[in-house]
């Protein structure tokens, strides 16, 4: 073996171990092992580990340090654009995409975000009671106005900013542009994008809000949805026991104190780090039975309701493939059912729930099986989250879960 190939082997082994850690969702371990990798792999891994933790400036610094050495390197083009958008730098995101795409047409939603940047106004902590709606037990909503029209806005962390059906968007006067394909659950469908002039949520006003419109959101799914990227603009608490949504300014000590004062009657149970891929895909470490190494896509908008053996209807807590259930020890005959009661506990960080309900996807492959290469094992839904008041802190990339009972 030559000295050159020996050096390559010494450098490649930590890189392979780092990538295996990344795929498992061991972000800290992937970052540690990246330090011993070659310069390109080290930069890529450091970008990714910083990016999913919300360290967008750090991620961009890692990218800039090596991009001139590897001009044909394209793997990070999209997450770099998302990092700039998360930093509210749409003009730079536009310039980056334009530089990397050459003469190909620019995505219309990116052009709109550059020409009409998102703005947020909130001068006090806003408390929005959950609205009375047939889907409220499974998908809470709050009263809102959208371009002057009163609407129920359903809270769904599986979405980005605003989502609705194409007919609803047209009825609200939102101009749409076809933007390719997307998934509604496991169904592939056309995607249209547009922009709402103003969304108001209590005392919060958001100007120039991106809209995703799907033709499949119709009939009993004709909903207006506010997603992760709306909540991201605030310190947000979805207080299920209190039937309310609380929003306050980020990085404002006075507003944070006012916000937390509203939760004085809630006992803190756990603080759990979360990661964010793309624009809105939050995932966190969870478990099933004895397993504690699973990665769950935190999708509060999953509304799958079923019945088993004549029991009352239940909302599924987990949603994944039969293959995954079988690998976790669920008997083959149960995993093959559309839905079933779980006989082992579900975990999110240190939180545990027994006697939960699960649903099985109708397809073997799902669109959310990997976020940036990280293995995603299942969706975790509102059925788990609705036991708590859970606060989403996008400055620290941390969930805080509280229980209704006050501390003794």
Image: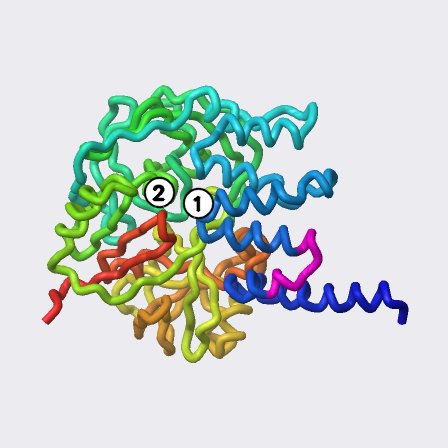
Image: 11 above or below 157:
below
Q: Pointers 2 and 1 in contact (CB under 8 A)?
A: yes
Residue 207 in view in this figure: yes
Question: Viewer-nearest of labels 2 and 1?
Answer: 2
Residue picked out by circle 2: 232
Residue 204 in the image: x percent, y percent?
Answer: 23, 33
Q: Secondary structure at mark 1?
A: loop
Residue 132 in view in this figure: no
Q: CA distance from mark 2 to mark 1?
A: 9 Å
Q: Secondary structure at mark 2?
A: loop
Image: 11 above or below 76:
below
Residue 42 or residue 77, whichever sits in front: 42
Residue 224 in the image: x percent, y percent?
Answer: 33, 36
Question: Residue drawn 49% across and 79% down?
Answer: 329
Q: Is residue 230 left or right of residue 16?
A: left
Write the start and end of the magenta stretch as one range.
33-41
Q: Is residue 89 left or right of residue 401?
A: right
Residue 104 in the image: x percent, y percent?
Answer: 67, 26
Residue picked out by circle 1: 280
Q: Furthest residue to the right? A: 2
Question: Residue drawn 63% across and 51% down?
Answer: 43
């Amino acid at each position: 073996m030559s000295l050159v190939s020996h050096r390559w082997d010494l450098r490649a082994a930590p890189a392979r171990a780092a990538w295996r850690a990344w795929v498992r969702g061991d972000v800290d371990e992937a970052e540690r092992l990246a330090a011993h990798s070659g310069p390109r792999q080290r930069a890529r891994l450091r970008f990714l580990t910083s990016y999913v933790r919300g360290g967008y400036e750090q991620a961009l610094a890692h990218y800039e340090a090596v991009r001139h050495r590897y001009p044909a390197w394209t793997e990070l083009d999209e997450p770099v654009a998302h990092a700039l958008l998360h930093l509210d730098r749409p003009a730079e995101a536009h310039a980056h995409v334009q530089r990397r795409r050459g003469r190909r047409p620019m995505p219309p939603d990116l052009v709109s975000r550059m020409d009409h940047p998102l703005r947020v106004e909130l001068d006090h902590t806003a408390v929005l009671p959950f609205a009375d709606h047939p889907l409220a037990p499974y998908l809470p909503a709050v009263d809102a106005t959208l371009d002057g029209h009163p609407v129920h806005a359903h809270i769904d962390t599986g979405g980005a900013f605003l989502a609705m059906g194409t007919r609803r968007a047209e009825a609200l006067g939102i101009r749409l542009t076809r933007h390719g394909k997307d998934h509604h659950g496991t169904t592939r469908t056309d995607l249209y994008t547009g922009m709402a002039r103003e969304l108001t949520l209590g005392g919060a006003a958001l100007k120039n809000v991106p809209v995703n419109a799907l033709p499949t959101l119709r009939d009993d799914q004709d909903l207006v949805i506010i997603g992760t990227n709306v909540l991201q603009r605030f310190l947000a608490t979805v207080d299920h026991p209190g039937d309310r949504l609380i929003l306050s300014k980020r990085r404002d000590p006075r507003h944070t104190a006012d916000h937390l004062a509203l939760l004085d009657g809630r006992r803190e149970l756990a603080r759990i780090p979360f990661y964010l891929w793309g624009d809105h895909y939050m995932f966190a470490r969870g478990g099933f039975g004895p397993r504690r190494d699973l990665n769950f896509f935190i999708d509060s908008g999953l509304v799958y309701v079923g019945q088993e053996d004549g029991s009352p209807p239940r909302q599924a807590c987990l949603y994944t493939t039969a293959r995954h259930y079988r690998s976790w020890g669920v008997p083959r005959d149960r995993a093959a059912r559309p839905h079933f009661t779980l006989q082992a506990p579900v975990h999110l960080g240190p939180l545990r729930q027994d006697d939960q309900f699960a649903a099985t996807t109708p397809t073997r492959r799902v669109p959310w099986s990997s976020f940036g290469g990280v293995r995603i094992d299942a969706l975790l839904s509102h059925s788990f989250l609705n036991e708590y008041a859970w606060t989403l802190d996008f400055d620290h990339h941390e969930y805080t879960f509280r229980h209704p009972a006050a501390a003794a």
